[in-house]
Image: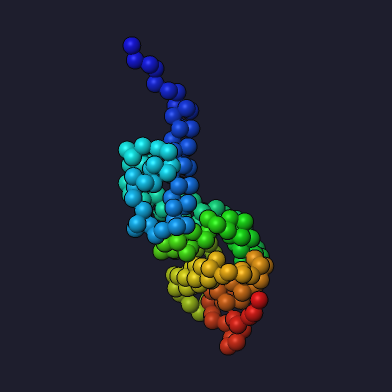
């Protein structure tokens, strides 16, 4: 006699546990080796799931990494958008750097352990969608160029910060980010000469 199928809630919980285990395992492995050297069988074993289970959730390890990056970016964007709506780019930068500082190891892996390209692409895609839905202030730069420059600058500055042996405090990085990247992009012009050069 066949046992009854598990109720949908139990199935959903199991799916969520498997996905979370795969995400945690990949992030742990990325701390030691690049994505291209991680075998899916080893990843599944580390997550405590079967090899076939991995493929029920993700077609490739790159898709898993994209899922992690997309989730983190959605959280970050949802945190900073309300502040940006008040047209206070410094406060938005502080919210962003505090969030990254609070999840330091995860963001370090995402931006310095082989996931930077996926993260940048996802951030750019989300930022373009958000920019298309928001009022467009008058600026010297085309909107799509301003967004692309801001995203590239944010990713590069955060990656630089996360690689430091003695990292700057989040508030100082927020100042740098606002002066060098976000503020100028929001205004649609480059900072005056010498303005972006700040010290710790």
Residue 127 in the image, given as x and y percentages of width and height:
48, 62
Look at the picture and state if 170 lies above or below 57. below
Q: How many marks do you count on the picture?
A: 0
Q: Residue 17 at x, y = what percent? A: 47, 37
Along the line of sight, which residue is nearer the eye, 114 or 134? 114
Residue 37 position by quadrant: bottom left
* Residue 99 horizontal side relative to residue 106, left or right: right
- Residue under the image location 36 percent in, 53 percent down: 38
Q: Residue at x 54, y 81 (%)?
A: 190
Q: How is the image coloured?
A: rainbow
Residue 77 vs residue 169: left or right? Answer: left
Can residue 133 be seen here?
A: no
Q: Position of residue 179 (x, y in %)?
A: 61, 76
Screen quadrant of the C terminus: bottom right
When the figure is inspected, residue 200 is found, relative to residue 85, above or below; the finding is below
Residue lying at 34% horizontally and 50% vertically, measured from the top left = 39
- Residue 1 lies in quadrant: top left
């Amino acid at each position: 006699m066949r046992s009854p199928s598990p109720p949908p809630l139990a199935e959903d919980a199991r799916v969520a546990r498997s996905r979370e285990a795969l995400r945690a395992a990949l992030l742990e492995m990325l701390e030691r080796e690049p994505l291209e050297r991680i075998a899916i069988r080893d990843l599944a074993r580390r997550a405590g799931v079967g090899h076939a289970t991995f493929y029920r959730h993700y077609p490739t390890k790159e898709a898993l990494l994209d899922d992690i990056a997309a989730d983190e970016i959605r959280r970050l964007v949802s945190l900073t958008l309300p502040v940006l709506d008040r047209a206070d780019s410094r406060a938005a930068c502080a919210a962003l750097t505090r969030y990254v500082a609070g999840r330091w190891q995860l963001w370090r892996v995402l931006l310095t352990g082989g996931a930077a390209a996926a993260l940048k692409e996802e951030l750019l895609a989300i930022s373009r969608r958000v920019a298309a839905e928001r009022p467009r202030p008058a600026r010297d730069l085309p909107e799509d160029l301003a967004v692309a420059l801001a995203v590239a600058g944010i990713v590069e500055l955060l990656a630089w910060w996360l690689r430091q042996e003695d990292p700057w405090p989040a508030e100082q990085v927020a100042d740098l980010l606002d002066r060098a990247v976000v503020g100028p992009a929001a205004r649609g012009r480059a900072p005056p000469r010498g303005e972006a050069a700040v010290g710790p």
